Amino acid sequence: MSTGFEDVSVEERVRDATRAYTDAIEPAPDAWARLRTNIDEPRMRPLPWRRGVVVIGAAIAVAVAIVVLVVVTLPGVDHHRVQTPLRPVPTTTTLAPLVQGPDAASTLLASWGRFHTGYVFVYADGRVIFYPDTAGMWVRPDGRVTAYPDPLGTDPPEEGVVFRHAVFERRLSARGLDLVRAGKLSFGSDLFSGGASNPYRRSKLWAERNAKVWQPSRWAIAVPWFVDATRWLQQLPVPVQDLLDGKQRTCHMHVANAHWMFPWGTEPDERGCFELTAAEFAAFRHIFDPSTSTTDATCDYCNLNTGSFWPSEVDGRPQDLLALPIYPHGEPQEWGG
């Protein structure tokens, strides 16, 4: 019996059977157009490592959002405060006043001191007032210095000079004052040494060739520590009471040297005192020492520049009557050694 496939190969039979099924399928009208579009413009699928970066980035964004939310809701946080930038804008450094003086020129810009070395005050108008505790100066009769510093015992540099331990004054040049204000020039132990680093020897820093002996214009008569000022005044000679009457004030003995090293360290800053002009202080001294001779003086230490003190008594107990110069910033400076 014939099947009709005797002359047809196996491959042809499979092809004919497949065509019989596919020809019966009707595709959508735009199917071929969409297929060609997908072939021409294949979709870019993210690679596995890119998917990981996306996930990590999303996690970081969520974490940042949580931190911001916590900071915003924290109690006591000032949300209007401007935060300090990571790289602050550079500013010019200017030395802040150490002590405001009675006027702008007398404002104290800087100070330095060391026990048994000396101290120095630098003022806004360029004045530098300093006391070399372990060295002195050769001074002419007009008060000008010829050589500094110089240890006691060396030959005088010229005739007519005397060796003095005193408080001295010298004025900075405009350049020197600018360097002080900018914090690029400071005075310390070098000022009291004979080395090449001593700023006293740098002529361009100074407006004056040499220093001179400082002349105080006001003096403080200090009330002894822990003694009532009124009680103390009543026991002084009557001419002294009349001279001091109405001139009482509070002196701040350590306002300029809070950062210095002192052996007494814990003494109070405030101390009762009476303020006198230079002429009134001359009259004050004359009451105790009518003679101008230092050999006849009753003071234990007599110095019209650094200070003087006389022996006195309060309620039968010995108490020093201390006189100290008042510096331009308006306060005396207690010293010892």
Image (cartoon, helix red, strand yellow):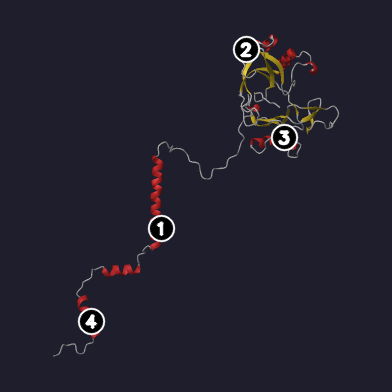
| Residue closest to the eye, 269 or 22 | 269
> Closer to the observer: label 3 or label 4?
3
Q: Neighbour class for label 1 at 10 Å: few (<14), some, many (≥20)?
A: few
**How much space separates mark 3 and mark 4, taking CA atoms?**
115 Å
> Closer to the observer: label 2 or label 4?
2
**How much space separates mark 2 and mark 4, taking CA atoms?**
137 Å
Q: Which mark is residue 231?
A: 2
Q: Reading the chain from its start, which is encountered first: label 2 or label 3?
A: 3
Residue pictured at 38% horizontal, 40% vertical: 73
Residue under numbered circle 1: 53
Q: Reading the chain from its start, which is encountered first: label 3 or label 4?
A: 4
Screen quadrant of the N terminus: bottom left
> Closer to the observer: label 1 or label 3?
3
Residue under numbered circle 4: 14
Residue pictured at 38% horizontal, 56% vertical: 55
Residue under numbered circle 3: 191
Do labels 1 and 3 touch, CB within 8 Å?
A: no
Q: What's the residue type where badge 4 is placed?
A: Val
Q: What's the residue type where badge 1 is placed?
A: Val
Residue 150's place in the image compared with 215, above or below, is: below
Do labels 2 and 3 touch, CB within 8 Å?
A: no
Residue 315's x, y, as percent? 65, 12
**How much space separates mark 1 and mark 2, taking CA atoms?**
87 Å
> Closer to the observer: label 1 or label 4?
1
Q: Residue furthest top?
A: 238
Residue pictured at 69% horizontal, 9% vertical: 238
Secondary structure type for disc 3? helix
